[in-house]
Amino acid sequence: MQELDMTISSADGLDWEEARSHVSAALDEDLAWGPDATTIATIGADATGTAAIVSREHGCLAGLPLAVLALQITAERDGVELDIEVRLNDGATVAPGQTLLRATGPVRTLLTAERIALNYVSQLSGVATATHQWAQILQDTGITVRDTRKTIPGMRVLQKYAVRCGGGANHRMGLGDTALIKDNHIAATGSLAAAFTAVRSKFPELPVEVECDTLEQVAEAVEIGAELILLDNMAPDVVKDAVGITRPAGVRTEASGGITLYNVAGYRDTGVDYIAVGALTHSSRVLDLGFDLA
């Protein structure tokens, strides 16, 4: 069996052992109610063939290493070998009719792995494709699109990997790598300054981002030492005014809330550093891919 080139994923921070564990669990779930009855009944044990994952539309690729893992793990469990030819790397753009990979071996193994392989690469390529659209629109503006924590449970690391494949950047991975002071924290402590001081006291080394709804809050956040300010639901002209406050102090900004591909043009010349788009991970349509058996 062909060994998968580890650089496909590890070069962009996708933990290989974690990915293998995730794929194994997905395969277990698919077989939790018994073996692949339809395939066993209709395909002879000695039948061999070649299957190809083929794009049905234009998009940006992510998750192909996980599709390969699904094929490899299934083959290992079946005690057989597959010859897998990877045609593209994650991050590549694809067109209708383009082959992403070809796998040759026992047909039973190929068909048992089919749905899990497609689930990964279709879902993650959908995230990468949506991110790529944003990255293209924001090209040459100095603005980077990035994700949020609005991810599918259990898929966060993989979806955020797909965002990177599409040309975006990741916001915090979880609750512990960056502090984000939001309105509820401010309400609970009594003031923005009190919330900021509490975080700095308890976690002095942690980066701190502050969510602001008004220019007055932006000025206060700059004054108390915030490193990054989230400009929540601000119109483009207000975002531009906020950047006028933050930039002289060297504080980065992130616009969030209600920004779509249809209105993002208004934010292109605001000077904001990031645009946060939760829809990248919670609402992206899967990329239409097929698993064609020859």
Image (spheres, helix red, strand yellow):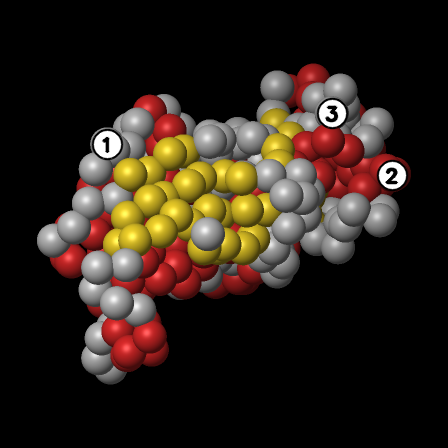
Q: Is residue 154 left or right of residue 218?
A: left
Horizontal arrangement in the rendering, residue 244 relative to residue 180 (left or right): right
Look at discs 1 and 2 and give the one toward the viewer.
1
Q: Which one is closest to the eye, mark 3 or mark 2?
A: 3
Instruction: Tell me: residue 273, above or below residue 233.
Output: above
Q: Which residue is mark 2?
A: 266
Closer mark to the observer between disc 3 and disc 1:
1
Residue beneath the point at 36% across and 44% down: 103
| Element on which disc 3 rests | loop
Q: Nearer the viewer, residue 209 or 103?
A: 103
For the image, the number of numbered tags is 3
Q: Nearer the viewer, residue 288 or 176?
A: 288
User: In which image quadrant can residue 65 be found?
Assistant: top left
Figure quadrant of the N terminus: top left
Question: Between 234 and 158, which is closer to the camera in this rendering?
Answer: 158
| Nearer-N-terminus badge (3/2) | 3
Q: Is residue 113 visible?
A: no
The reply to whether dot 3 and dot 2 touch (C-beta < 8 Å) is no
The kind of residue on which mark 3 rests is Gln
Q: Which residue is found at the position 53% from the left and 32% from the top?
A: 91
Q: Position of residue 293 (x, y in %)?
A: 45, 55
Find the distance from the CA under tag 1 to the CA under tag 2. Answer: 47 Å
Q: Which mark is residue 48?
A: none
Q: Is residue 175 left or right of residue 162?
A: left
